Image (spheres, rainbow, N blue to C red):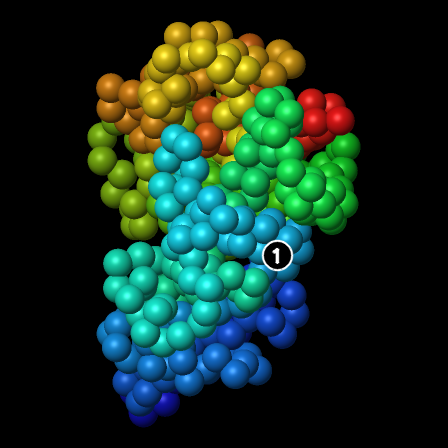
Amino acid sequence: MHESNQKIQIEGLINKYAGKLVHDGLAEPAAPCIIAMTGGGPLRAGDAEVFPVLEHALGRLGINSLIYSPPAEPYRTIINYLSQTSEISGGIADEGGVLFRNLPVLQELTESGITAVLEKRKSVIIAGRGIIAAGRENLKQAYITYSSVCFACFVKFFIDYLRRWRRRGIEPAEKAAFERASGMLDSLPETPPLLMEGPFRSEDDILRAMEEAGKLIVDLRLVDSCFGNVSYRSGRHLFISGAGSFLDELQGSIVKCPLDGTTCADAPPPSRELPTHRQIVLTTEYRAVLHGHPRFSVILSMDCEDDNCTGREMCRKVCPRNRYIGDIPIVHGEPGEGPYGINLTVPPAIAGKPGVIVYGHGVFTGCGLDFNRALQNLLGIENMCRKKYFSRVR
């Protein structure tokens, strides 16, 4: 009976994450191939010739699950280009290690090859074919890794293109990939749908408003499901999304935290950005706060025109320059708290502003009543950054 219940549960998770990959624009319908272990052996979903290879690798690795899928466009064009260029034939790496230091690439799909890589890494790209992501403990980890690879490659491709454009170093193959990928980008609305109106007095209304806002910023592709956070202040407490929670599935994943800094009693633990959210609501007029990772906002935050900067390796932690995109400040800092924590840089910068962009880490916005203005500003900042990006490369 236990094995039967576990099988049903795992089958439900396989269907869930296959659906999320498609919904989030990361894979085409019917493309994801997922294999997950149960007490009775592996369960599989997807029509794939790669299952024997995946099953053997899964057994040798002794992990919970693997996801394999060709990425949806424009990720497919981007990742195919990155994985086939000679300079990164052994792995995709960025300059500053902001998003990743190296993403391993294999030219062929073999059980020995993917096993050797996944013994040490969370993912591997098979050139011209797709991404394999590992979930060591559960399927959610594999989904998050797959999503992270797509996001990181997208940002790397477009920021590298902008830097090379400025230096007049674009090769024909890169330009062709850029034009193809750019032509397949989803359009963003100028104005988001209306959300619940505040201020919110009851705890039930706060939770419903946060759930609604979280789902919408995922649906608008302003964040990749679990890579952002939402909060709302009510009196002496801050309600905030839990660590690692999917923003489009916040029911049961919102934590109530005292604003005096004492320990949050709820489970799951709060987002690691709690210190930043807390400081924002304590030091500004905002009580509703959104944090997302819209792609072109991240890309432009990393675009510094000072080629002679001697502190480029420290950009993420500290930057001596006051940088802006339009009237939106760009600040430095690392997620969480500490000597370089963004809890020290974001709150003073966002006061009186529509929002603030953190170098390589996304956008924070706020509103004094509800999430409507915060969402409108988040969307507006990303639209502005996308337009400015393409104005710089044409």
Q: Which residue appears at 61% of the width and 29% of the height?
A: 169
Amino acid carrying mark 1 in the image: Arg
- In the structure shown, which secondary structural element does the residue marked by tag 1 occupy? helix
- Left or right: residue 238 versus residue 177 is left
Q: Is residue 14 above or below residue 334?
A: below
Name the residue tied to disc 1.
Answer: 76
Q: Which one is in front, 266 or 320?
A: 320
Q: Which one is in front, 266 or 328?
A: 328
Q: Which residue appears at 28% of the width and 26% of the height?
A: 337
**Quadrant position of residue 52:** bottom left
Q: Horizontal and vertical percent for residue 386?
A: 68, 30
Whether residue 192 is visible to the viewer of this picture, yes or no, is yes
**Quadrant position of residue 96:** top left
- Left or right: residue 243 versus residue 359 is left
Q: Which one is in front, 117 or 136?
A: 117
Q: Horizontal and vertical percent for residue 136?
A: 29, 65
Q: Which residue appears at 27% of the width and 38% of the height?
A: 264
Q: Which residue appears at 41% of the width and 42% of the height?
A: 93
